[in-house]
Image (spheres, helix red, strand yellow):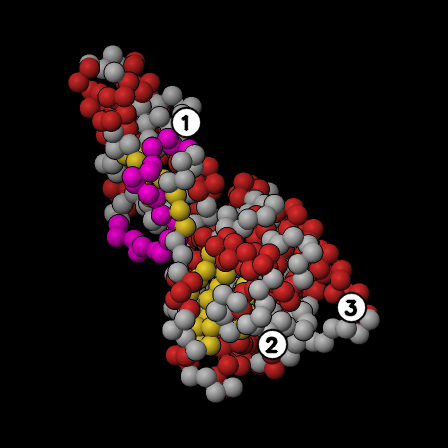
Amino acid sequence: MNEPTFHHALKILEEVCTGCVHCTVVCPTEALRVRNGKAILNENRCIDCGECMNVCPVNAIIVEQNDIAEIFPYKARVALVSSIFIGQFPRHYQTRKIYSGMLEQGFTHVHESEHGAGILIEQINQYIAQNSQNKPIISSFCPAIVRLIQVRFPSLVENIMLLKAPLDLAALAFKKELIEKGYKEEEIGIFYVTPCAAKIAAIKSPVGEEKSVINGVVNMNELYNKVYSTLKKEQYSSCIIPEKEQLKSEEMGWSLTGGEAAYIQGRCLSIDGLNNVIEFLEGIENGKITNFDFIEVRACDQSCAGGILTVANRFLTRERLDERIAKYHHDKSEGKIFDNKTIENHGRYIRDHISINSIEPRSMLKLDDNMEAALKKMSRIKKILSYLPGIDCAACGSPTCRTLAEDVVQGTAHTSDCIFIQTSLNVPPNEEIRAETIWGKDRFRKLL
């Protein structure tokens, strides 16, 4: 029963939490409970999707981050930023000026994290052809989806594509380039500017790798505020304004819905939003959805444009990036765009390091290590469920009646935690002690 724990970027502020159960209800992996009036997290179930943070009415759930001051011990301070960041700004700000605003914060180099997508396209198509027995191949781009499959759809783990995301490929290439220019490895700090919590967790605790090449993470909303302030003041005097954009058009849209599947051969589909993804994966798991070669799945609506650490409307972000792609095509036809050679120069190196190790399922509900004991617990869960009302009100502190039954057999809850059971049994007044273990003493004093 001793499951390994995983790094999580989402943190619950106990002193702020009111135990309102909003978070427990929306969690797609049923990772949250309310006990003693506070939300508590089952770390083995959490996938860092951020749904709980989105619905928390008192901002009791936050995302950890590296202080931007942590970049300064490094001689080469690389900001690796998603193209989504560019789409956050009002459209009259040129990309190169946004780059300059980032350099103004202390970074010495700015690169967009989708640079490796060009090489990845050919590798994905080869991977699909070589692993036809595991179709549909499921994209590994979104770390929240990878973790969702691990804990909720373990039978589909073998379908996850074992190739690195562009973020990791770009980090490898730019680090190698800096080393070739004379920097020592310990002098290079690569910091990813993230739009979501799941990527923080993926960097701190990579799936399919022992350690990430990325040194730290800066939250996108924090850096946006700093850069936007610089842009409004037009403070560019101390840094160089880059002369040209470097991403190719297929790379600019990679972090948007459809950006990946558009370049993959065969029958492909793009799905975004956790509820949509779960419904689709259930269809694949039970055999109702078949004959797809590749599935692009992203946890957030509009993919990374809808990340919990973005500041702009996701649809406006998409509009701006679509305009940027159209401008690229225009400038290329006018001869104003020159291909960036960094990635191509290290193409062989990237291809040699593009694979990740196999991904293992993570048991969301392991009743017992002993099979006989587990079967007995399963039987008891069914019996308890027959007494519970089945309306999933979450007033017991567990998200559903089934999870309450699971918690009861695991010894972390009691059947009388259900308010309907209490009523039907005419529970004596001293049983309110049970209720206090869910909601805390202060909540009941407030009602007197």
Which residue is label 2 attached to?
Answer: 343
Query: In the rendered image of this protein, does residue 431 appear above or below residue 340?
Result: above
Is residue 227 depicted above or below 151 in this figure?
Answer: below
Residue drawn at x 38%, y 73% as measured from the top left: 73
275, 228: nearer the viewer = 228
SS label for mark 1: loop
Image coordinates for residue 446, horizontal then vertical, percent: 27, 21
According to the picture, the residue beneath numbered tag 3 turns out to be: 331
Locate residue 27: give its quadrant.
top left
Residue 59 in view of the camera = yes
Task: Find residue 350 and report its horizontal and vertical position in percent.
Answer: 55, 76
Residue 342 shown left or right of residue 181 in the figure: right
| Disc 1 target residue | 392
Q: Amino acid at mark 1?
A: Asp
Q: Going from the N terminus, do you reach mark 1 or mark 3 first?
A: 3
Where disc 3 sits, the SS reads helix
* Residue at 28% over, 32% down: 37
Marks 1 and 2 close (CB-CB < 8 Å): no
